[in-house]
């Protein structure tokens, strides 16, 4: 079951990271040695970091452009390049996961969502997309766990209860599924 585009757009807002979000600002890093004095990192280090962030943004934007055009293999290659640049490009794990998901490579997508969640545990979008991937490969309990996490981020989003209810039904947990369907109906009458 693939989420509809309206729901996808809504839940993408949970990601909380626009595009690749590699910029941290500033031109030099301040470090505090063990003696307590602040030291400013050499400008060439800051320039290298800035160049790395610029490359991260470049590959992330290019990957997003390819994904928007349905060229998911090319998108994955760009996200790979961004990820190779290190932790400033961590959002690319989530974006690459979405590309893998669109190719039906759900297990790879799940691995990328796992990594994205390591970096951004308060970003509900990654949990949502991982739940969708789990649902696709029949790991309904894992999907339910992730939908539950997303519901914690947005308890008033009716479609989340609907999706979790469907996953519960697949595990023959009809009583719990009905509770979710009733909650979805209460929040949005179009779900009744």
Image (cartoon, rainbow, N blue to C red):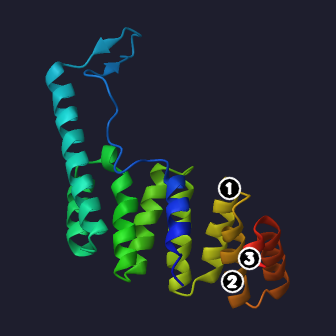
- The residues tagged by marks 2 and 3 sit, at their Cα atoms, a distance apart of 12 Å
**What residue is drawn where x is 24% and y is 66%?**
66
Crowding near the residue tagged with mark 3, few <14, some 14–19, many ≥20 C-alpha atoms within 10 Å: some
**What residue is drawn where x is 53% and y is 76%?**
3
Q: Is residue 29 left or right of residue 141?
A: left
Crowding near the residue tagged with mark 2, few <14, some 14–19, many ≥20 C-alpha atoms within 10 Å: many
**Is residue 114 or residue 31 the one in the foreground?**
114
Identify the residue under disc 1. 154
Q: Choose the circle earlier in sequence order: 2 or 3.
A: 2
Asked if marks 3 and 1 touch (Cβ < 8 Å), the reply is no
User: Please, what secondary structure does the residue beneath circle 3 have?
Assistant: helix
Give x and y (percent) for residue 41: 24, 19
Looking at the image, is 16 positioned above or below residue 30?
below
Corner quadrant of residue 34: top left
Circle on res. 191? 3
Nearest to viewer (mark 3 / mark 1): 3
Looking at the image, is 48 positioned above or below residue 163?
above
Asked if marks 2 and 3 touch (Cβ < 8 Å), the reply is no
- The residues tagged by marks 3 and 1 sit, at their Cα atoms, a distance apart of 17 Å
Quadrant (top left, top right, bottom left, bottom right) of the N terminus: bottom right
Q: Choose the circle earlier in sequence order: 3 or 1.
A: 1
Nearest to viewer (mark 2 / mark 3): 3
User: Please, what secondary structure does the residue beneath circle 2 have?
Assistant: helix
Give x and y (percent) for residue 152: 70, 56
Q: Choose the circle earlier in sequence order: 2 or 1.
A: 1
Give x and y (percent) for residue 125: 52, 59
Identify the residue under disc 2. 166
């Amino acid at each position: 079951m693939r989420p509809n585009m309206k729901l996808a757009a809504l839940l993408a807002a949970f990601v909380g990271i626009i595009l690749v979000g590699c910029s941290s600002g500033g031109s030099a890093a301040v470090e505090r040695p063990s003696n307590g004095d602040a030291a400013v990192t050499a400008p060439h280090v800051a320039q290298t970091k800035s160049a790395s962030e610029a490359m991260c943004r470049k590959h992330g934007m290019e990957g997003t452009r390819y994904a928007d055009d349905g060229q998911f293999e090319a998108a994955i290659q760009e996200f790979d390049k961004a990820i190779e640049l290190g932790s400033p490009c961590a959002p690319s794990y989530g974006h690459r996961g979405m590309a893998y998901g669109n190719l039906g490579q759900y297990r790879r997508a799940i691995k990328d969502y796992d990594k994205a969640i390591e970096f951004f545990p308060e970003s509900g979008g990654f949990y949502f997309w991982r739940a969708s991937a789990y649902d696709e490969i029949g790991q309904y309990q894992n999907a339910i766990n992730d939908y539950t996490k997303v519901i914690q981020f947005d308890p008033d989003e009716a479609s989340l209860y609907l999706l979790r209810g469907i996953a519960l039904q697949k595990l023959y947990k009809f009583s719990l599924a009905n509770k979710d369907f009733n909650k979805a109906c209460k929040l949005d009458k179009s779900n009744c």
